[in-house]
């Protein structure tokens, strides 16, 4: 039996952040790397079958869409053809480069961390079996991630379909596609394929897409997606999936009426389930939460002392940056006296549609639910000079403040580069800044970042009546 200070099960964002932190603390560590997510080699979901490849393809789809819409007078451009196989080959090369530079090479540089390319399973609460090895450690971190969840619809066992993982590996574009799911992942893939010329239909179970976002963002984004030719169907209860002739179909029920949708391909973006089946968690006594993910407290401790969990295997929010933060914090909590907790209200999230959607903190409804007497203000992006300059005034910004203190408790943005713009609001929420703090801060003109200042000023006066750069 091999004795070490720390065992990390997993090789994605949470595991690597944990390994890097452990190495900096001089902790003798073994990372055990295989997991159950298809296509996820070293580096995990994000670099292999998540953020990196999807955002590459989304970017190319936006480029194609920009050319086709010819937003600028005097410039006539066209796309003669799209070689999708070349696009995918270049995407694969980019992924391989990231995997080598950001993961394999990083792992080799860690002096106190060794790697085993096997599945890890508990023998007991302090012992892990990895291949032919038996490893004993006082502290163990589970960071095995999650994989796509596909609902058990009638006919699913005999009908081929895609998840985001398979969709990132196809070599030819279908003519039409049904995307089941209207949250972040479903919307990103729906618009990406629509930009490449695929006829896309979205089927969403709830009454709206992205139901936990501000209604203004939902309404505006729904309209923009429909302008891209995407058909959005909400309140759909799935009944059956199958194949008829050359196409696949889904039967569903909407407002008491049965409907059938057909397309060349079906993509499920219906959530994720944890990679826990191979872990033998019962042998260690680790408990799951109500959603079936590994339960943890604010310090990332599981129900068993000495066993921690981080990343997607613990459930929402399933974000790469959150996973990394959790891996780092769990390791720090396990080996130092400087105990940390994560405030999830300070964590931004984004949807990489075009325009992008991003938010941080509480929505209007959430703030009221927390007992905050709040005030809200939203302005269209058309009031931001840079939006007019670049020829894309789609979107809005909405700020939620504490009515008494004027402290910013939440912000939602729909615009180009919203995922970048949300960071000013994130700092505002984290450091309890007020709208007066934002107004008093000089912003660069002309930039989209002025949206935050203008939305803050709008609490006091009608900014549509102001000149540029008014302080």
Image (cartoon, rainbow, N blue to C red):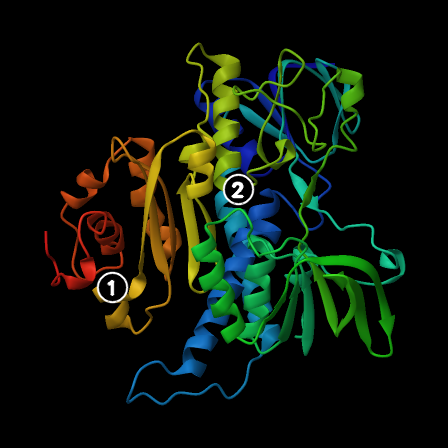
In the image, taking residue 444 as reference, residue 367 lies left or right, namely right
Q: Position of residue 199 (x, y in %)?
A: 63, 76
Q: Quadrant of the N terminus?
A: top right
- Compared with 135, 277 (above or below) is below
Determine which residue is flagged by label 2. Answer: 319
Q: Nearer the viewer, residue 134 or 185?
A: 185
Badge 1 local density, few (<14 within 10 Å), some, or many (20+)? many
Query: Can residue 393 be seen at all in this image of the molecule?
Result: yes
Classed neighbour count for the residue bearing mark 2: other residues with Cα under 10 Å, few (<14), some (14–19), many (≥20) = some
Residue 312 lies left or right of residue 392; in this view the side is right
Q: Nearer the viewer, residue 156 or 434?
A: 434
Q: Is residue 89 visible?
A: no
Pointer 1 and pointer 2: residues touching (CB < 8 Å)? Answer: no
Q: Which mark is residue 383?
A: 1
Judge by depth and name the residue closer to the eye, 105 or 297: 297
Relative to 50, say whether 91 is above or below.
Answer: below
Residue 425 is situated, as x and y percent measured from the top left of the image, at 32, 43
At 38% from the left edge and 83% from the top edge, which residue is drawn?
Answer: 70
Quarter of the image holding residue 251? Answer: bottom right
């Amino acid at each position: 039996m091999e004795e070490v200070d720390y065992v990390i099960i997993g090789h994605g964002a949470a595991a690597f952040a944990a390994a890097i932190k452990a190495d900096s603390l001089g902790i003798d560590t073994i990372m055990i790397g295989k997991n159950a997510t298809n296509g996820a080699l070293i580096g995990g979901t994000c670099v292999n079958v998540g953020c990196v490849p999807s955002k590459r393809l989304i970017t190319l789809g936006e480029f194609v869409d920009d050319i086709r819409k010819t937003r600028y007078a005097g410039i006539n451009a066209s796309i003669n053809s799209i070689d999708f196989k070349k696009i995918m080959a270049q995407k694969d090369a980019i992924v391989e480069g990231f995997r080598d530079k950001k993961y394999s090479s990083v792992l080799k540089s860690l002096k106190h961390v060794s790697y085993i390319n096997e599945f890890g399973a508990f023998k007991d609460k302090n012992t892990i079996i990895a291949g032919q090895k038996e490893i004993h450690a006082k502290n163990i971190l589970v960071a095995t991630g999650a994989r796509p969840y596909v609902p058990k619809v009638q006919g699913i066992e005999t009908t081929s379909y895609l998840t985001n993982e398979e969709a990132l590996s196809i070599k030819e574009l279908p003519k039409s596609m049904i995307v089941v799911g209207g949250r972040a992942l479903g919307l990103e893939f729906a618009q990406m394929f629509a930009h490449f010329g695929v006829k896309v239909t979205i089927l969403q179970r709830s009454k709206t897409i992205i139901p936990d976002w501000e209604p203004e963002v939902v309404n505006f984004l729904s309209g923009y997606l429909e302008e891209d030719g995407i058909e959005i169907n909400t309140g759909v209860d799935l009944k059956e999936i199958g194949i008829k002739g050359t196409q696949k179909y889904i039967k569903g029920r909407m407002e008491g009426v049965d409907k059938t949708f057909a397309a060349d391909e079906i993509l499920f973006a219906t959530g994720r389930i944890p990679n826990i089946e191979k872990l033998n968690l019962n042998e260690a006594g680790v408990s799951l939460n109500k959603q079936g993910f590994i339960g943890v407290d604010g310090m990332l401790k599981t129900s068993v002392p000495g066993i921690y969990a981080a990343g997607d295997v613990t459930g929402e929010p399933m974000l790469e940056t959150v996973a990394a933060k959790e891996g780092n914090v769990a390791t720090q909590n396990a080996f130092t006296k400087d105990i940390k907790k994560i405030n999830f209200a300070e964590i931004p999230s984004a949807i990489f549609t075009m325009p992008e959607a991003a938010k941080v903190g509480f929505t209007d409804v959430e703030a009221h639910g927390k007992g905050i007497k709040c005030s809200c203000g939203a302005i269209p992006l058309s009031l931001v000079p840079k939006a007019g300059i670049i020829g894309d005034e789609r979107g809005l910004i909405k700020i939620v403040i504490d009515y008494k203190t004027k402290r910013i408790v939440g912000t939602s943005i729909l615009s180009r580069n919203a995922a970048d713009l949300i960071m000013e609001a994130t700092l505002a929420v984290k450091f309890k800044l007020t709208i007066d703090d934002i107004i008093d801060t000089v912003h660069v003109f002309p930039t989209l970042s002025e949206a935050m200042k203008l939305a803050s000023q709008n609490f006091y006066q009608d900014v549509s009546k102001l000149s540029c750069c008014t302080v």
